[in-house]
Image (cartoon, rainbow, N blue to C red):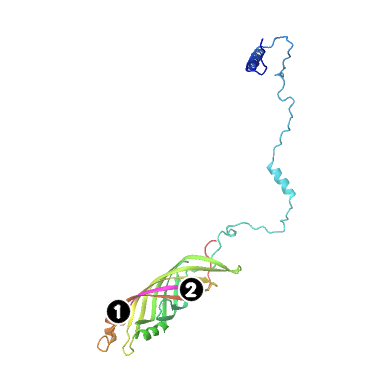
Amino acid sequence: MRRTSPTSPRATGSLLFRAALCVVLGGALAGTAIAQPAKPGGDDEEIEMGDEDAPSDAGEIEMDAEPEKDLAADLSASTEDTVKVDTTTREVKPVSWQDIVVVMRKPFLKIRRTDLMPFLATTMNDNMIRHYSAGAQFNYFLTDVLSVGVEGQYYTKQFREPFDLVGRQARRLPTINKYNFSAALNFSYVPVYGKFAILDKHLVAWETYFTAGVGVTQSEVVPRDPRFEAFTNLLITPNVGASMRFFLFQWLTVNVGVRDYIFLDKFEPKVRTDTMNASATQAKENADSALINNVMFQVGLSFWIPPTFEYTTFR
């Protein structure tokens, strides 16, 4: 008889088969035992469940009911703990509409007041001749932002360096006009108002206003040859400008601004001899025309009449 080695494939297969069979049989027996009901009177003791009639809160920790909160009591208690302030010595004033200030009043009113402003001005955009003017404005304010007024100016001239340089280099003098006087009817409107602080101590109120108007300007030809007579022109002159006003006192303000005076001026003819355009009338009839923008910078002081004002409306 031939013996089989324990490590042979046949022996290994036999062992695996037996192990699998044991597992299957054990599972079947276990399932049968679980599926069978417990026998009455058997040795197995059942787990007894609690009595359904017992109160459900047995064995539970009972919490005390939370007391109701009283807001008035809490407030009175907290008030008693704070430091009491003696108000018997202070005078309690009744509250009225006059004590409620939402927007601060403007420190300056212009309505139904007259602005008398003397000013000085100078030309900004002419490189041949510079004009200085002294003038005055008289403005009446219909409302606090709208005014109507008149102005007048008297001019003096000063030839600038390019005027002589052109004559020396080109051997000819430039054609220029000077201005004698001007007057205008103006309207102004104030769209911007504000305040600024000086060294965080003093407040200065200011406003920006625009001006538009129409008037007349008299210009005079400066002859290239002094032998010939000069002639003058009376020109329709619309003007536009923007200015700023700084309030110092109830009766005094400082104004700075720029104005553009626009007119169609007439200049001396290019050819002027003893036989052609010799007289002022002939030269004016044959004059050359050009559109002029006389831009001027103005500085002035305004004296207000009456010097004081009163508020007549509610705060």
From the viewer's side, name the closer residue of 170 and 258.
170
Residue 43 in the magenta stretch? The answer is no
In the image, what residue occupies the spot 48% across and 70% down? 244
The furthest residue to the left:
275
146 in relation to 175, above or below: above
310 in relation to 27, above or below: below
Residue type at mark 1?
Asp
Q: Position of residue 208 (x, y in %)?
A: 48, 68
18 in relation to 145, above or below: above
State the quadrant of the N terminus: top right
The furthest residue to the bottom:
227
Q: Nearer the viewer, mark 1 or mark 2?
A: 1
In the image, what residue occupies the spot 39% across and 78% down? 182
**First to last magenta residue range:** 256-267
- SS state under label 1: strand
Tell me whether the residue at label 1 lies in contact with that at label 2, contact meaning CB atoms closer than 8 angstroms.
Answer: no
Residue 262 in the magenta stretch? The answer is yes
Residue 25: image quadrant is top right
Q: Position of residue 111 (x, y in %)?
A: 48, 68
Task: Give the residue number, with chain letter if any, for mark 1.
Answer: 288
From the viewer's side, name the closer residue of 71 and 257.
257
Residue type at mark 2?
Val
